[in-house]
Image (cartoon, rainbow, N blue to C red):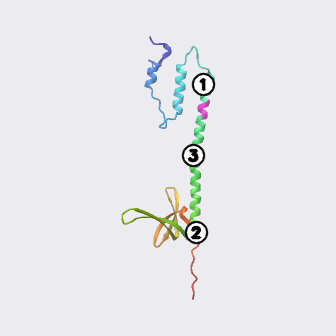
Amino acid sequence: MANSLNTITVDGVTYNADAYAATQKTETKKNDELGKEAFLQLLVAQLKNQDPLDPQDNSSYIAELAQFSALEQMTNVASNLEDLGKVVNNIDTSVLVGQLSSMIGKNIDWVETINEADEEGNPLTHQETMTGVVSGVVLIEGNPKIVAEANGEKYQVDISNIGHVYEAYEAPVVE
């Protein structure tokens, strides 16, 4: 004989509360966070399944709601801080691109890493100091780089490899 405290009636059909709860799937986020919907479902289940002769104190429900509300606000703050960090990073990149654009037409010296292979096919890496003229600025995967022309070729130069920036010098014309 089923205890009336352990039953649930849905759409006029009475079920065993444990069996019904097992059939109901609670959706959770992929990262296993407890979502708003899941929390509310748990709270409703708690209310439905409490002993009517010894109900839980209302203050405990209010405390749970307050904790959930505080957690939700902290989650929102963390999300907003992450978004703000992206905005700041974009602003920093934009400012840097603007500053690098002022280098167009100037000469630069930079260190170029050259990867080669020896006669046996073993990799060899050496560095060479290059000199060229800045012709532009590009963003590659969010990282600004200088486009420099040297010896008839274009190079994408990482700004950390630039050693010297200077005005182009033209020799005076002697008549």
Question: Relative to the observer, which residue lies in front, 41 or 126?
Answer: 126
Provide the secondary structure element on which disc 3 rests. helix
- Using the rendered image of the protein, determine whether residue 21 is visible from the camera's viewpoint: yes
Q: Nearer the viewer, mark 1 or mark 2?
A: 2
Q: Residue furthest top?
A: 1
- Residue 84 in picture, x, y percent from top left: 59, 48
| Residue 61, numbered circle | 1
Q: Are marks 3 and 1 in contact (CB under 8 Å)?
A: no
Give the mark, 1 or 2, whose residue is nearer the N terminus: 1
Quadrant where the N terminus sits is top left
Residue 4 rendering spot, x and y as whole percentages: 49, 13
Q: Which residues are magenta?
A: 66-70
Q: Amino acid at mark 2?
A: Val
Which sits in the foreground, 121 or 79?
Answer: 121
Q: Residue at x 57, y 46 (%)?
A: 82
Figure check: 148 above or below 90: below
Q: Is residue 40 magenta?
A: no
What residue does disc 3 label? Answer: 82
Q: Nearer the viewer, residue 23 or 153?
A: 153
On-image quarter of the C terminus: bottom right
Q: Residues within 10 Å of mark 2 (few under 14, many from 20)?
A: some
Q: Does 67 lie within the magenta span? A: yes
Which comes before the other along the chain, label 3 or label 1? 1
Asked if disc 3 and disc 2 are in contact, CB closer than 8 Å, the reply is no
How far apart marks 1 and 2 lie (CA) works out to 67 Å
> Which of the 4 image quarters holds residue 106?
bottom right
Q: Identify the amino acid type marked 1.
A: Tyr
Task: Give the residue furthest to the bottom.
Answer: 175
Q: Which mark is residue 165?
A: 2
